[in-house]
Image (spheres, helix red, strand yellow):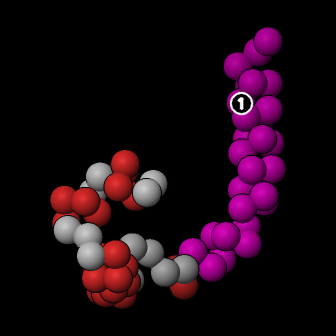
Amino acid sequence: METNVRKEIALKRCKELKDNIKDYLEYQGSIPTGFTEWQQIRERQEKIKTFFKASDQEWLDWKWQLK
């Protein structure tokens, strides 16, 4: 297969994939992330730890989380 043919196939596939995520690309700037929501995440974590009387060490233990 010629290099140009491979390149055309790759470019066509790239366009298809970009079209598949077009909606996401339009809204990605307005989607909250862990960085922008960090304060709220920490507050929820503290509420949960208080409710379950959990320590920071327990919070990080996956076995405790499954109790």
* Relative vertical location of residue 23 with respect to residue 63 in this rendering, above or below: below
7 within the magenta span: yes
Residue 45 in sight here? no
The relative height of residue 10 versus residue 57 in the rendered view (above or below) is above
Quick check: can you spot residue 19? Answer: yes
Dividing the image into 4 quarters, which one contains the C terminus? bottom left
Q: Position of residue 40 (x, y in %)?
A: 36, 87
Q: Residue at x 39, y 73 (%)?
A: 34
Q: Left or right? Give the position of 24 relative to 20.
A: left
Spot occupied by residue 53 in the image (x, y as percentages of width and height):
27, 76
Q: Quadrant of residue 44?
A: bottom left
Q: Secondary structure at mark 1?
A: helix
Q: Quadrant of residue 54?
A: bottom left
> What residue lies at 74% left-to-right and 50% top-to-bottom?
17
Residue drawn at x 76%, y 15% as measured from the top left: 2
Q: Residue furthest top?
A: 1
Q: Is residue 25 magenta?
A: yes
Residue 20: percent from left, percent from top: 78, 58
14 or 47, nearer to the observer: 47
Q: How many marks?
A: 1
Towards the viewer: 8 or 13: 13
Residue at horizontal 49%, vertical 81%?
Answer: 32
The image quadrant that residue 22 belongs to is bottom right
Q: Main secondary structure of the magenta part?
A: helix
Q: Quick one: quadrant of the N terminus? A: top right
Q: Is residue 49 left or right of residue 37?
A: left
The residue range painted magenta reads 1-28
Which amino acid type is marked by label 1? Lys
- Does 60 sit above or below residue 4? below
**Front residue of 31 and 44:** 44
Disc 1: which residue: 7
Q: Position of residue 55 (x, y in %)?
A: 20, 68
